[in-house]
Image (spheres, coloured by chain):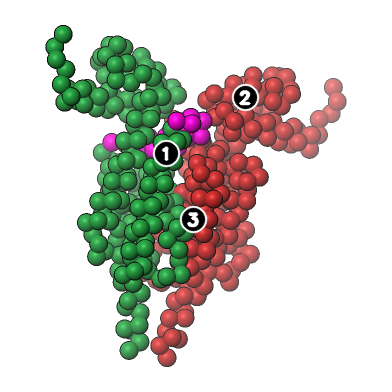
Chain colours: A green, B red
Amino acid sequence: MPKVTAEYRTGRREQILAAARLCFMRQGFHATSMQDLFKEVGLSSGAVYGYFASKDALIIAIAEDNMRDVVDMVHTIATRRTEDSLGDLLAAVVGMITERHSRDGLAGLAVQVWAEALSNPVVAERLDTLLSQLREDIAGIVADRQAAGFLTADVTGQGLASVLLAIIPGSILQLALIGPSALDGVPDTLRALWPEAAQAEAPQACS
Amino acid sequence: MPKVTAEYRTGRREQILAAARLCFMRQGFHATSMQDLFKEVGLSSGAVYGYFASKDALIIAIAEDNMRDVVDMVHTIATRRTEDSLGDLLAAVVGMITERHSRDGLAGLAVQVWAEALSNPVVAERLDTLLSQLREDIAGIVADRQAAGFLTADVTGQGLASVLLAIIPGSILQLALIGPSALDGVPDTLRALWPEAAQAEAPQACS
């Protein structure tokens, strides 16, 4: 038996996941059989089962990858652009998700994962963990922006985090159902709704 | 044969739809068989097929009912409360959806309909028609509020409609996955984000 390196296993795992994404985007989770996947990836059942024990395991892996990517996007944008307004940050997140969707169909898979979470407790639990993480990150960003005078103090960090947490999947849903054209004008609107240093500028206009 | 009145048919149709909603909420669309439905509603296959030719027809009917209810909610709130700010209106819509979800599990069914639309062209087409209607309604409401000075003119009606169209399903998703507690503070935040006559008040503060 040849020695199997960690890189080899990682590459093979990615290859199987990429084929599963294609099948799921084309036919949906429920209409895709493991046979469809073996055919798509060009591997034997044994080779695939060495990495993923079931279709559920594949769905969970894809759900986690997608969610973690969105959490990472929010993190990266927020830490790199500390001088930006909340509107700029949110516009950047929506822009990045749109671009990613054009590349690999992220949005359609995300919507399927949400529906799956309603009847699959393992998917539900993973999604819940990642959503809580995203909520905490966003609440932190909101608090920072409030401390810097970018946002009025009469919105709570938790309340605004819930609104922003609605805008992100709500944008993903429109990408999935209608396509990128549904989000025309959205980044500009977000920038106009939460403009840079809006709170700090208001008193200057009166002096 | 007894004469079947239109009211009788409407009642029977509603009875079948209510049973289908229960089955779909419990097991999801794909795991529910027509046999599960016959058992839940307590009718023969013939009696059910006289109203709905297939599981797909039931899914489409439920999707249309739900979406039409959300469109009607937005309509009613916007026409009854013409003096309210956009934040007040949106807070009322989110409040009404939360209440409706507590009563009949609207959110879980909605998320399943979205996923179904990705692989079922008939569901996709109906959802698209209703989404376009909702988008037009919201764009109209935004234009009215801008004309009344409640909203800055530098956001476009279409762009803001897309953001609001993201907040509604994004809130539904959080209701479905986490429950009403996920939306704690959201109505207050929406009111604070788009306060009544915010644009009209700003110049007065300087005079």
Q: Position of residue B40 (x, y in %)?
A: 69, 25
Q: CA distance from mark 1 to mark 2?
A: 35 Å
Q: Which residue is mark 3?
A: B136
Instruction: Inspect the image, locate mark 2, and give the three-letter code of the amino acid beneath it.
Output: Ala
Residue A127, disc: 1
- The magenta stretch is A104-122
Tell me if residue B9 comes above or below residue A48 in the rendering: below
Local SS, label 2: loop
Residue that extends furthest to the right in the rendered view of this protein: B2
| Distance (Cα) linking label 3 and label 1 | 33 Å
Q: Nearer the viewer, residue B31 or B125?
A: B31
Q: Residue at x 32, y 78 (%)?
A: A201
Residue sitting at x 81%, y 30%: B4
Label 1 and label 2 in one chain: no
The local secondary structure at tag 3 comes to helix
Main structural element of the magenta stretch: helix, strand or loop?
helix
Q: CA distance from mark 3 to mark 2?
A: 32 Å
**Chain containing the residue with disc 3:** B
Residue drawn at the location 53% of the way across and 69% of the way down: B85
What residue is disc 2 on? B53
Question: Which mark, by number, is residue B167?
Answer: none
Q: Quadrant of residue B91?
A: bottom right
